[in-house]
Image (tube, rainbow, N blue to C red):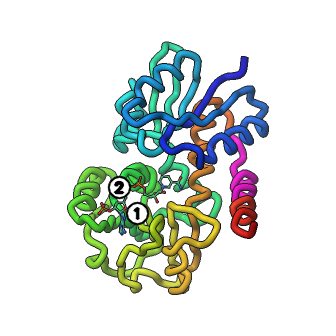
């Protein structure tokens, strides 16, 4: 019988994870079935219990990443700090191990897929929500010179910086207080979803700046349009992060690393086809 995997969320019908993991399974000749499960709010534990009677691994998306963290028995270091997880792994002894692969997925997309080193760089992170909490440890492990977190609610940026201050040079402030130029700017706010722009000064961008919006879409995001208009060196979106976090989960479950590049390219093409249809 094929091994069972799934993604749980609410809503879930937009999820690209079944397509991504089925392609990975074909590529690596793994015998598995990966499905999408719509979980009613407040029902994560029941659904996860039911799934893990036969299932081997779960991805978890909005709004259940904190519930998944509560559900797990053991954690990777980055998952423990993140307080929210996107990957659950059923172990031989029946316990459930949790990992957060979002951050390492984004770091791989920036450094490996796009050849942009983080080491020694001045990094600005916009936003202080769950997604940003999940990326901070993998970003700091790349040894940037400094990370500044800027957020609409300043106290959240400061608290987050405090939580990660033992692993690198990191501080928090409001958007208007951001000073100087940055080599890498990561937009981890959900402002792009509503077509809004975090109000950071234009002076943060110089000609060598790489801008990364964790959101992705067929059109360049509002944030990336803004950055391109200021002549940033590169504007990247979160599609590569989505595929890389999946590749990382897949490797944790199956012990083989799938190839992410062809999957990124084929989803990008299908986004463009939908746009022009
Ligand atoms: P949260 O709801 O936890 O946090 C949202 C953050 O955005 C907060 O910092 C909030 O500020 C800020 N924000 C919201 N609206 C605005 C606005 N209009 N102007 C300025 N700041 C705003 O969301 P998540 O952290 O879970 O997700 C953030 C983004 O990351 C989403 O766009 C999501 O799609 C993306 N993401 C992408 C992934 C990928 O694989 N590519 C994976 C995970 C997330 P405040 O604290 O003041 O409310």
Quadrant of the image containing the N terminus = top right
Circle on res. 189? 1
Residue at x 51%, y 75% (from the top left corner): 222
Residue 254 picture quarter: top right
Q: Image height check: is 262 above or below 89? A: below
Question: Residue 175: horizontal and vertical position, in percent?
Answer: 31, 74
- Ligand 1 sits in which quadrant? bottom left
| Comes first in the chain, label 1 or label 2 | 2
Q: Which residues are magenta?
A: 258-267
Q: Is mark 1 within 8 Å of ligand 1?
A: yes
Q: Nearer the viewer, residue 65 or 124?
A: 65
Q: Image height check: is 210 above or below 171? A: below
Residue 273 picture quarter: bottom right
Secondary structure of the residue carrying numbered label 2? loop
Q: Is residue 240 visible?
A: yes
Secondary structure of the residue carrying numbered label 1? loop
Q: Image height check: is 170 above or below 251? A: below
Quadrant of the image containing the C terminus = bottom right
Q: Categorize mark 1 by other alpha carbons within 10 Å: few (<14), some (14-19), many (20+).
A: many
Residue at x 39%, y 54% (from the top left corner): 136
């Amino acid at each position: 019988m094929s091994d069972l995997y799934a993604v749980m969320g609410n809503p879930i019908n937009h999820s690209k994870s079944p397509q991504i993991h089925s392609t990975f399974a074909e590529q690596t000749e793994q015998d598995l079935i990966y499905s999408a499960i719509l979980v009613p709010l407040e029902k994560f534990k029941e659904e996860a219990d039911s799934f893990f009677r036969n299932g081997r691994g779960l991805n978890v998306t909005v709004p259940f990443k904190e519930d998944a963290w509560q559900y797990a028995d053991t954690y990777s270091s980055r998952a423990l700090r993140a307080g929210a997880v996107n990957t659950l792994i059923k172990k031989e002894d029946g316990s459930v191990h949790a990992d957060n692969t979002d951050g390492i997925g984004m770091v791989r997309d920036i450094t490996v897929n796009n050849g942009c080193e983080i080491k020694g760089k001045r990094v600005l992170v916009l936003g202080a929500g769950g997604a940003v909490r999940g990326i901070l440890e993998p970003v700091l492990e790349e040894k940037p010179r400094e990370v500044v977190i800027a957020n609409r609610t300043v106290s959240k940026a400061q608290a987050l910086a405090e939580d990660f201050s033992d692993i690198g040079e990191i501080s928090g402030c409001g958007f208007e207080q951001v000073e100087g130029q940055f080599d890498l700017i990561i937009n981890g706010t959900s402002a792009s979803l509503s077509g809004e722009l975090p109000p950071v000064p234009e002076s943060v961008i110089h000609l060598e700046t790489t801008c990364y919006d964790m959101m992705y879409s067929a059109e360049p995001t509002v944030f990336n349009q803004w950055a391109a208009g200021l002549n940033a060196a590169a504007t990247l979106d979160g599609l590569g992060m989505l595929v890389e976090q999946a590749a990382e989960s897949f490797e944790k479950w199956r012990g083989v690393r799938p190839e992410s590049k062809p999957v990124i390219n084929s989803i990008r093409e299908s986004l463009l086809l939908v746009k022009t249809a």
